Image (spheres, rainbow, N blue to C red):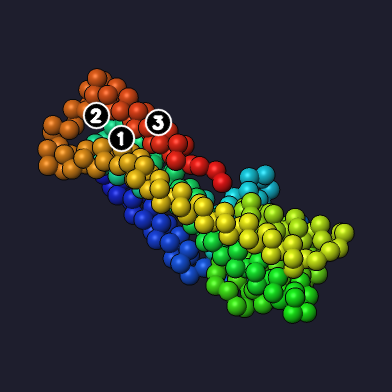
């Protein structure tokens, strides 16, 4: 069989899998409480008949991968990472999406230069989904932390007005915007299904890996054990968190120029190289075919990556 036909068939299959994964990401599945609890807690809240019905609705390859990955230790970690990014994907779907991305990167590199660039393209495709998940996690965590000060104030005011802690969290779920409203809504549903306050809040902390949230949950758990004025404690914590958010915002403003320099150092050479490759492919191809050129590329890549991370480390000021 013609190698070109094999490459074309693999590229077509990869693109189909890619767009199927994108469609699943955009549409998602129904936000079932049983699915959420099964992902974040150790309890089995999903009936066997419902589990079988859901498995039958999925494609056979996805259902088989789900069963295989569920038996591995990394499956739970991957599910937690997807939950922190708020992606409506199963672990098997994410795995297939990752494979499709890697194949597309490999085939693009193979079609362009037919040498080591194909391996580099495959590595880039392998890491793109992971970078996307990390980016969504970071954005969601920042949005959550920015809302946490107002959330604690609303909790404290609700407690002063005579509401219980559960009613106060339900008020937060109704009154505030996502992602805080979504996360506290899940906490309320978990408590309604039989989990204790401590278990539900610990599940929240696993979904949102925030130091500020950890401080608030620790205060609530300590109050549950020893008692005291929870509203006053939450007011103090809320003031501390708001001040920390304000200082972090000032630091990000001051270091914006340095962070921009890091991105320019990292991505400008790639953009310039792609521009030259488009207009003078023969001239740039020497870098990829000659041993000296490959050594120069590897050295330059190591220097750019090192410079980028050094700048990021310098401007990452802890508050």
Q: At x 40% / y 45%, what residue is drawn?
A: 255
Foreground tag (1 vs 3) = 3
Of residue 104 and residue 35, the one placed in the foreground of this image is 35
**Front position in the image: 111 or 22:** 22
Q: Which callout, 1 or 3, points at the residue further toward the start of the chain?
A: 1
- Between marks 1 and 3, how big is the CA–CA gap? 21 Å
Task: Return the x and y of residue 29 as percentages of the image width and height.
Answer: 55, 69
**Marks 2 and 3, how far apart at CA:** 22 Å
The one nearer the camera, 109 or 293, is 293
Label 2 neighbourhood size at 10 Å, few (<14), some (14-19), many (20+)? some
Task: Report the residue that reaches farthest toward the right.
Answer: 226
Q: Quadrant of residue 92?
A: bottom right
How packed is label 3: few (under 14 Cα within 10 Å), some, or many (20 or more)? few
Please tell me whether mark 1 sits on a helix, a strand or a loop. Answer: helix
- Image point 76% across, 71% down: which residue? 165
Residue 15 appears in which quarter of the rendering? bottom left
Task: Mark yes or no: residue 203 visible.
Answer: no
Q: Are marks 2 and 3 in contact (CB under 8 Å)?
A: no
Disc 2, SS? helix
Single out the residue that lies furthest toward the top.
Answer: 292
Mark 2 = which residue? Answer: 288
Q: Residues within 10 Å of mark 1 (few under 14, many from 20)?
A: some
Earlier sequence position, callout 2 versus callout 3: 2
Is residue 268 among the parts visible in the rendering?
A: yes
Q: Position of residue 190 (x, y in %)?
A: 73, 69
Which residue is label 3 attached to?
A: 306
- Secondary structure under tag 3 reads helix
Residue 135 at x, y = what percent? 47, 52
| Residue behind mark 1 | 117
Residue at 30%, 42% (x, y): give it: 264
Seen in the picture, residue 310 relative to 85 is either above or below; the reply is: above
The reply to whether callout 2 and callout 1 are in contact (CB within 8 Å) is yes
């Amino acid at each position: 069989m013609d190698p070109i036909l094999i490459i074309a068939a693999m590229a077509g299959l990869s693109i189909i899998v890619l767009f199927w994964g994108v469609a699943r990401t955009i549409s998602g599945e129904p936000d079932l409480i049983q699915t959420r609890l099964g992902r974040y807690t150790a309890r089995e809240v999903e009936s066997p008949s419902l589990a079988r019905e859901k498995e039958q609705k999925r494609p056979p390859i996805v259902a088989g991968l789900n069963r295989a990955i569920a038996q591995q230790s990394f499956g739970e970690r991957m599910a937690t990472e997807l939950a922190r990014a708020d992606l409506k994907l199963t672990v098997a779907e994410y795995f297939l999406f990752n494979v499709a991305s890697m194949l597309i990167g490999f085939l693009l590199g193979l079609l362009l230069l037919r040498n080591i660039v194909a391996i580099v393209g495959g590595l880039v495709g392998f890491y793109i989904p992971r970078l996307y998940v990390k980016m969504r996690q970071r954005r969601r965590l920042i949005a959550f932390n920015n809302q946490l000060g107002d959330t604690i104030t609303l909790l404290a005011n609700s407690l002063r007005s005579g509401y219980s802690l559960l009613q106060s969290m339900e008020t937060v779920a109704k009154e505030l915007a996502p992602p805080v409203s979504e996360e506290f809504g899940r906490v309320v549903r978990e408590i309604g299904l039989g989990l204790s306050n401590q278990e539900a809040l610990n599940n929240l902390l696993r979904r949102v890996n925030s130091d500020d949230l950890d401080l608030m949950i620790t205060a609530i758990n300590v109050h549950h054990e020893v008692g005291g004025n929870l509203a006053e404690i939450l007011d103090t914590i809320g003031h501390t968190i708001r001040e920390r958010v304000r200082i972090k915002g000032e630091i990000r403003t001051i270091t914006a120029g340095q962070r921009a320099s890091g991105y320019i150092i990292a991505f400008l050479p790639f953009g310039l190289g792609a521009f030259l490759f488009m207009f003078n492919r023969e001239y740039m191809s020497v870098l990829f075919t000659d041993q000296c050129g490959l050594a120069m590329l590897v050295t330059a890549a190591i220097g750019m990556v090192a410079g980028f991370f050094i700048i990021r480390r310098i401007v990452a000021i802890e508050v």
